[in-house]
Image (spheres, grey):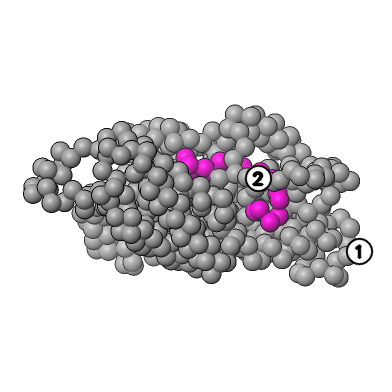
Amino acid sequence: MSVDSSSARVSSQSNAIRSRRGESHASGSPLDIIQRTYSSLRMLPPVIAGLSSWTQLHAPRFNRAEDIATATLTIRHVILILLLVVVWNSVFNSRDTHRRSTPRLMFLRSQSEAVLTGTAACTVVLWLGRYIFPSIGLRSISLVGFVERCMASGLLFVLLGVALYEVAYRFSRPRLYLIVGGRQRAVEAYKILKSHGEKRGNVLGFVDSDSSFARYLPCDYLGGLETLEKILMSNPVEMVYIALPIKSQYAAVQETIWTCERLGVECSCPAEVFETGLGRQSHSSLRDLKISVYRMVEEGDQMLLKRGMDVVVASFALLLLSPIMLAVAVAVKLTSPGPALFIQERYGKYRGRFRMYKFRSMVAGAEGLQKELEEQNEASGPIFKIKRDPRITTVGRVLRKLSLDELPQLVNVLKGEMSLVGPRPMALRDVHLFSEGYLMRRFSVSPGITGLWQVSGRSNTDFATWIDLDLQYIDGWSIGLDLKILLQTVPVVLSGTGAA
């Protein structure tokens, strides 16, 4: 298949996909999850302070646990609590304190000021409630006690938010960017991408057809736009930032977007197509850059649900299958010399390398023997397959038949390197043999233990069909599809259909 034909096919597919799923700017990064969690938790202080004050007021008549359970909150109580939450949350939102690019000390100061202001506003509401709802006993509640509880719990959540942000920031992996453009806008983008909160990262270099400004760029000039696809195939770039003027270089911008779509690389371009006087940008992923982001895969709440399902199912499976895994490890160790586990570097999401775990099903040093067997390769494309591979041990053949050799990958799932469902992680040797850019699109999602390939023939499927199934999964991904594949995997594994 030629690059031009695959480009046309991917372009037509991507238009249909975008129309089905809509545009998404949400992210599933650790800092995004923390930001959402903190935004929810920070609404609790007035509720905690109000309920604790009400409980303290009625404490003398709570002689048994049943007394607390039978205590009633009237509609007026509920209305007042909701009003306190609305006022409290409005104070935080009005200060725009949720921006993740805010430095830690500025974040702490602005959030603390919001706690003080929110406490004062809620106290005023509670004081007015004494006169608006005189029959619900608010006059007996201590305003000083309410202020103390509200401020204490509010500041506690702020400190918790700062700590969580700091931990996630330190452990988050810097992204690798590529900038298309070479003038002032590109240099400004470089400075922001190098220091922009959770979006911080390393810039591989600049690509621009105009090389006249190359000597003024803060990092490497990599060549013209014609080299973009080759660069993306050779480097694990996570996002291409287009810093070209859209009005004067529309064709170049469009070609860059098509190239990124073909290779499955996230791209973004400036949103300032038109000049505005009072209009304000909103919902951009990198606010200081004012950009529109185009992703190949939706990364919203469903992706968070997918990750949650991965963690729960993998944890339960490891607990349930641990006796079987122990027995397999002993069997491998006793029947052939060498370690029980086979650990190999594979390519994951955005072509990031990780160490994949499997029970060893071949003789020790099998990778070194592969060169001698290359001429016997029976698979088409860059993959290596031999039906009767002499390197496979007797126990290993049984493990592969029942897919028991894959069980240690549940640990990779818990580490976030893999998912339960997704394209299979490919060996470095195979990926280095890729010759067409559209093959790289399979790396726009996390690899999985099982997928469409496994439930559609497994090792009996040729490489072209394998890739088509991977792209079909990526383009039509949903939680429902993951559940369907997981359910179909069970009978396929038990029957050993198509196993190597």
What residue sits right under mark 1 in the picture? 212
Left or right: where 106 falls relative to 136: right
Quadrant for the N terminus in the image: top right
Gap between marks 2 and 1, in whole Å?
34 Å
Left or right: where 379 falls relative to 236: left
Where is residue 471? Give x, y as percent.
Answer: 57, 38
Report if the CB atoms under discs 2 and 1 are less than 8 Å apart: no
Quadrant for the C terminus in the image: top left
Residue 295 in magenta stretch: yes
Tag 2 secondary structure: loop
Residue at (53, 62) in percent of width and height: 110
**Which callout, 2 or 1, points at the residue further toward the start of the chain?**
1
Residue 289 falls in which quadrant of the image? bottom right
Seen in the picture, residue 488 relative to 254 is either above or below; the reply is above
Where is residue 472? Give x, y as percent.
Answer: 55, 34
Seen in the picture, residue 51 relative to 166 is either above or below; the reply is above
Tag 1 secondary structure: loop
Where is residue 257? Give x, y as percent.
Answer: 73, 44
Q: Nearer the viewer, residue 239 or 448?
A: 239
Q: Amino acid at mark 2?
A: Ser
Left or right: where 172 falls relative to 205: left
Q: Amino acid at mark 1?
A: Ser
What residue sits right under mark 2 in the picture? 282
Other residues around mark 1 within 10 Å, as few (<14) / some (14–19) / many (≥20): few
> Which disc is residue 86 wearing?
none
Which numbered disc, 2 or 1, marks the residue closer to the eye? 2
- Magenta residue span: 286-305
Q: Nearer the viewer, residue 354 or 168?
A: 168
Q: Nearer the viewer, residue 71 or 449?
A: 71
Residue at (73, 34) in percent of width and height: 8
Where is residue 259? Give x, y as percent.
Answer: 73, 45
